[in-house]
Image: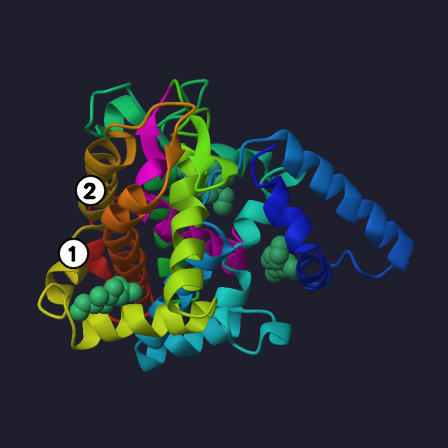
Amino acid sequence: MVGLSFLDQNFQETIEHKQKMASFLGLYSKSSSSFLLLCFICFALMKLSNVRAWSKEGHTMTCQIAQSLLSPDAAHAVKMLLPDYVNGDLSALCVWPDQVRHWHKYSWTSPLHFIDTPDKACNFKYERDCHDQHGVEDMCIAGAITNFTTQLSHYRHGSSDRRHNMTEALLFLSHFMGDIHQPMHVGFTTDEGGNTINLRWFRHKSNLHHVWDREIILTAAADYYGKEIDLLEKDIESNFTDGIWSDDVENWRDCSDISACVNKYATESINIACKWGYKGVKSGETLSDDYFNSRLPFVMKRIAQGGVRLAMILNHVFGDSQQEFLAAT
Ligand SMILES: *[C@@H]1O[C@H](CO)[C@@H](O)[C@H](O)[C@H]1NC(C)=O
Ligand SMILES: *[C@@H]1O[C@H](CO)[C@@H](O)[C@H](O)[C@H]1NC(C)=O
Ligand SMILES: *[C@@H]1O[C@H](CO)[C@@H](O)[C@H](O)[C@H]1NC(C)=O
């Protein structure tokens, strides 16, 4: 179903990645045939469920941008928390939460990847919207970001709760800072953030959620950057260092209380989802140049904001100024 063609295209690459991932998880110790079986099961499970996440590319860019903006203290902490084989590259593991969300052990993380808001309400209210389908409070992206930020803030003082795995907390936080900036991750309930709105993207089948997760990014990479995601990412970076967004960055970064900031990010997303994501889109239609050209700037800006703000949070929690920042939690 959703995301299937992506998996097939990138099968080799994914296998390689999963091998690394499996060794990270301590699973790649047996024979490669049991590993292949594991892969098969993973694929089968992924095919069964709607995919809800910035694509691999979106998450990778968000995390690369963030890592380039870390203070020395935060850069050191991140390096200490990452497994050796990624050579200090946070972005290599920023999709990890998507890969484990269907595993039994991590099934509790599944509702943390998105926020369902009432259809057409076009706003976000934490008390009303931040819960899972059984009504358990805080089980949404906004609650998850605050949760893992709080967990990580104990790392520096060596006061971490032993039940919490700091590496996992870092990966979850990094991933969810990407997700909360993907506008369709804060979407309407009935259509599952656009996942059930099937349509065409130029010539192939897709859905509205996936258009924002991946199609726009890949079309941009193909049309303007010779399919080089790294070049696309460098262009995003140059646009906030001394380009169109350079005057906005301070404002993006501004945050004195994590809970309030997370609510702001979710509100920004549902506003963009309403005005630019859903607007004028009907199930069964074909989206092409007009939609692509007018939405591309939003996708790029959200990736930039996600990266800048992830760095801001990591600089807080691994630096000196965390007290006030977490006051409300
Ligand atoms: C933390 O989680 C990672 C990934 O799940 C695992 O490989 C690692 O062994 C865990 N660390 C601790 C200290 O449990
Ligand atoms: C916070 O993290 C812990 C595990 O580290 C988990 O049990 C709990 O459900 C999480 N809550 C949210 C809202 O993310
Ligand atoms: C960067 O800004 C220029 C306008 O100065 C724009 O044409 C380009 O699309 C932007 N690139 C990205 C990746 O946002």
For mark 2, give the secondary structure.
Answer: helix
Q: Which residue sits at x=13%, y=70%?
A: 246
Q: Which residue sits at x=37%, y=26%?
A: 131
Residue 86 vs 24, above or below: the answer is: below
Question: Residues in magenta?
Answer: 160-189
Quarter of the image where one finds residue 141 = top left
Residue 307's disc number: none
Nearer to us in this view, 110 or 305: 305
Residue 73 placed where, x, y %?
A: 34, 78
Residue ID for mark 1: 255
What amino acid is found at the position of numbered circle 2 in the picture?
A: Glu
Residue 311 placed where, x, y %?
A: 31, 66
Residue ID for mark 2: 268
Q: Is residue 169 magenta?
A: yes
Quarter of the image where one finds residue 92 = bottom right
What amino acid is found at the position of numbered circle 1 in the picture?
A: Cys
Q: How many marks?
A: 2
